[in-house]
Image (spheres, helix red, strand yellow):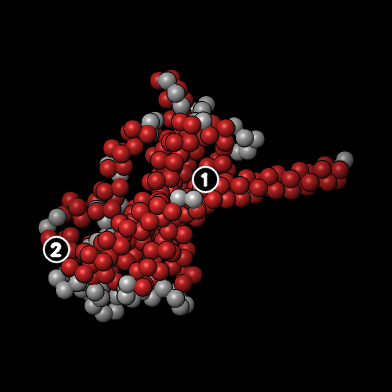
Amino acid sequence: MSGKTMTMNSPMKATSLRHLLQALRAIVWRELLKFSHQRSRLISALVRPLLWLAVFAAGFRNVFGVSIVEPYDTYVPYDVYIAPGLVGMVLLFNGMQSSLAMVYDREMGLMRLLLTAPLPRWWVLACKLSATAMLSLVQAVAFVIVAYLLGTELPLLGPHTAMLLLATACGAFMLGAVGLLLSVHIKQLENFAGTMNFVIFPMYFMSTALYPLWKLEESGANWVYQIARFNPFTHAVEWIRFACYGKDAGISPCVVLATLAVCFGFACWGYDPQRGFGALAKRGGGGPA
C-alpha cells in the first residue's frame, strides 16, 4: 500500500513542480514582453543615472575628493565612486515602478484573476518579484554599457563578475520586495506619486549612493549619517561597490537578504484576503487584490 502511495505521489509532485515552473515562465515572459514594447521606459530608466554621471560627476570630479577607504586601494574619481550608486538608482526606480504596475493591474482586475489561480499565493507573488528583478538587471546592464562607453572605468569584467552579478541580483530582489510591499498599501494610482516621494528620495539621498558615510559624519550631519547607516539601500549599494573589487562587504549582504525576506513575507501576508492588510482593507472597503 505504501509503495502505491509513493508511486502516486511522485507523478503528483512532478506535475505540481511543472505547473509552478510554467507559471514562473509565463509571468516573467509576460513582463519581459510588455517591457520590450515600452522603449520609452528603458530610455527614461537610463536618463536619470546618465544625467548624474555625465553632468554632476563631471562637475564634481575635481571638487569632491574620495579618500582612500575600502574597497578602494587608491584615490578614485567621483564618477567611479557613484557608478555603483547609480546602478542602485536603476534598481530602486524599477522596483518602485513595479509597485505602480501592481496597483494598475489590481485596478484593472488582472491581479485578482492572477491571485485566484490554482497556485500558492506566495508563489504567484514570487513570480512577480522575479520578473521585476529580471527587468531591473536588464536595465542595470544597459546602464553599465552606456557608462562604459562614456569612459567610466569600472572593474566589471574579471574574476569578480559572478560576485557582482550576485550582489546586483540580490539588490534587485530586495528593492522589488519593497515595491511589492508598498503596493499592498497603495489603493489608487493617484496616491502613488506622493507615496513614492516619501520612499524613493529618502532612500536614495540618505545613503552612500552619492557620498561616503565618512563625508556625512565629517560634515556634522549626524542624523543623516545615522539614517544612512541603517538604510537598506545603503547596504545594497555597498554590496555592489565591494563586489566590484572582490572584497568583503561586511554585514551588507545580511541586511539586504533580511530586508528581502521581511518585505516579501509581509507582502504575502498583506495580499492574503483572509488576514493581514488585505482583511483590514476589506473591512474599510476593498482589499489589495
Q: Residues within 10 Å of mark 1 (few under 14, many from 20)?
A: many
- Count of numbered badges drawn on the protein: 2
Residue 3 picture location, percent across and down: 86, 45
Q: Earlier in the sequence, mark 1 or mark 2?
A: 1
Residue 228, image x and y in percent?
A: 25, 54
On the question of residue 57 being in view, the answer is yes
User: Dot 2: what SS?
Assistant: helix
Q: Is residue 28 visible?
A: no
Residue 115 figure quarter: top right
Distance from Cα at disc 1 to Cα at disc 2 = 42 Å
Local crowd at mark 2 within 10 Å, few (<14), some, or many (≥20)? few
Q: Nearer the viewer, mark 1 or mark 2?
A: 1
Q: Is residue 133 left or right of residue 239?
A: right
Query: Amino acid under label 1?
Result: Lys
Residue 148 location, x and y as percent?
36, 72
- Left or right: 80 as drawn, with respect to 118: left
Residue that mark 1 sits on: 128
Q: Residue at x 27, y 56 (%)?
A: 207
Residue at the spot 26% in from the left edge and 79% down from the top edge? 74
Question: Mark 2 and mark 1 in contact (Cβ < 8 Å)?
Answer: no
Q: Which residue is at 30% across, 44% downward?
A: 199
- At label 2, the amino acid type is Glu
Residue ID for mark 2? 218
Image position, residue 222 (x, y; %): 16, 54
Q: Residue at x 41, y 42 (%)?
A: 99
